[in-house]
Amino acid sequence: MTNRPHILHVFPSFEIGGAQRRTASLLKNGLKEFDHTIIALDGNYEAKALWAGSSDTVVFSEDICFPKNSMYRAIRAARKHLKNIKPYLMITYNWGSIEWNLANSFLPICPMFHIQDGFAKEEQDTEINWRKILRKLMYNQCDKVIVPSKLLYKIAQKSWRIPSKNLVHIANGIDIHQFQNPADESLIKKWGIKQDDFIIGTVAALRPEKNQTGLIHAFKTFLDTLELDPSQSAPLRNIKDKTQVKLVIVGDGSEMADLNQLTKSLNLNEHIVFTGAIEKPERILPTFDIFALSSKTEQMPISVIEAMAASIPIIAPNVGDMQTMVSSENASLITSSSPNALARNFKLLFENPDMATAIGKSNCNKATAIYAFRNMLNAYEQYIWAALPD
């Protein structure tokens, strides 16, 4: 580490997910005037792999032990660590880092930002009351509360009473051109994906709130209603056999074993591919004909922006900013998380490839115009520099 301004990032977990990928992108491609320390409170540093090599500006504090099952002890430990680290700025992420906000709220040690990306499964329908009260108290102590979605902005205003001067909406951004190259042939071959296959794909952590169970049932419904005529000289999309229709699930998590078991019970082994986590999803995204989500809760998923940049149509439930994120041509496909609704939209795009192509192009145009990485980086740099002590 050097004498550059030091930023501490506190994550509940540094598993590979949207917030972690955004942070890796920001720290690898910008914010290099700062030193950064990343703490994962659960000890999971899986997303460290996103750096794909060493960095002289980022340190992962894997030796920090953090108390569990006692908020009081957790606050004391956080306060002690803050005094030792003495960062110029602390950035906390989501509910699981609330003890660090508490530790820095009275006689604060440093300025602090809080970034809220969404809610976990226990709050997918409504906020837990005591958490809402604590969010209102603690996040109002932050110099800035940053949210990626317009829906979260409204929640932060109405539920947590964050004043407008402290509340910031910064849309997620990506390197658009990174997702406009061909797929990695060696990776595609590894998973048995062929050029003529029809691929419905997703990129998401395998956690309950992502509702991959619903996605698998939707895929099964779609497959059962699919009628193919292999005798035709030019079958639709060159699909002559149902085994050419596949669901590719990119991601890892606690539900992997259960989802594999569900796949077997539905006799979908020939159709569903579990790749596990892939550090660079652009290596496989270009093979997708449809990008699908079935989440019960989302805000502004980076994976959707990446699929848009790759000119892929999106089918997903109307949660968070989903319907306004995608192009106007795609908006009608953002409906419900029910398997039947998802399956109907899968079939619609399967039977209308020209429509799918046109929607994919309009998504790419919108991603290029609005969700460029530079826009996001400039906003973060502006607020971080302004918060640093003189």
Image (cartoon, rainbow, N blue to C red):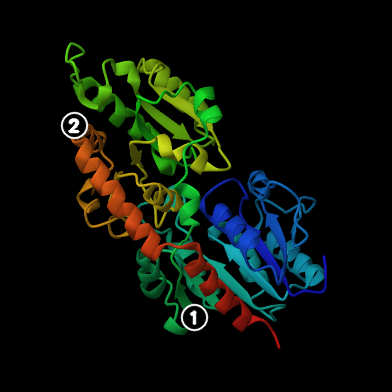
What residue is at 30 percent from the left and 47 percent from the top? 360
Pinpoint residue 138: horizontal percent, then vertical percent.
Answer: 55, 73
Q: Could you say where residue 187 lies in the image, as x and y percent from the top left?
A: 54, 29
Say which quadrant the C terminus sits in.
bottom right
The residue positioned farthest toward the top in the image shown: 231
- Secondary structure under tag 2 reads helix
Instruction: Measure the alpha-carbon separation of dots 2 and 1.
Output: 48 Å
| Residue 227 coordinates in the image, percent (x, y) | 18, 19
The reply to whether residue 320 is in sight is no
Residue designated by label 2: 351
Classed neighbour count for the residue bearing mark 2: other residues with Cα under 10 Å, few (<14), some (14–19), many (≥20): some
The answer to whether residue 281 is left or right of residue 125 is right
Q: Position of residue 350 (x, y in %)?
A: 23, 32
Q: Residue furthest bottom?
A: 390
Report the side of 97 relative to 125 (left or right): right
* Residue 47 placement, left or right of 209: right
Residue drawn at x 66%, y 63% is 9
Residue located beneath label 1 in the image:
166
Q: Which mark is residue 63?
A: none
Count numbered badges in the picture. Answer: 2
Residue type, mark 2 in image: Glu
Q: Report the amino acid beneath label 1.
A: Asn
- Name the quadrant of the N terminus: bottom right
Q: In the figure, 359 relative to 188: above or below?
A: below
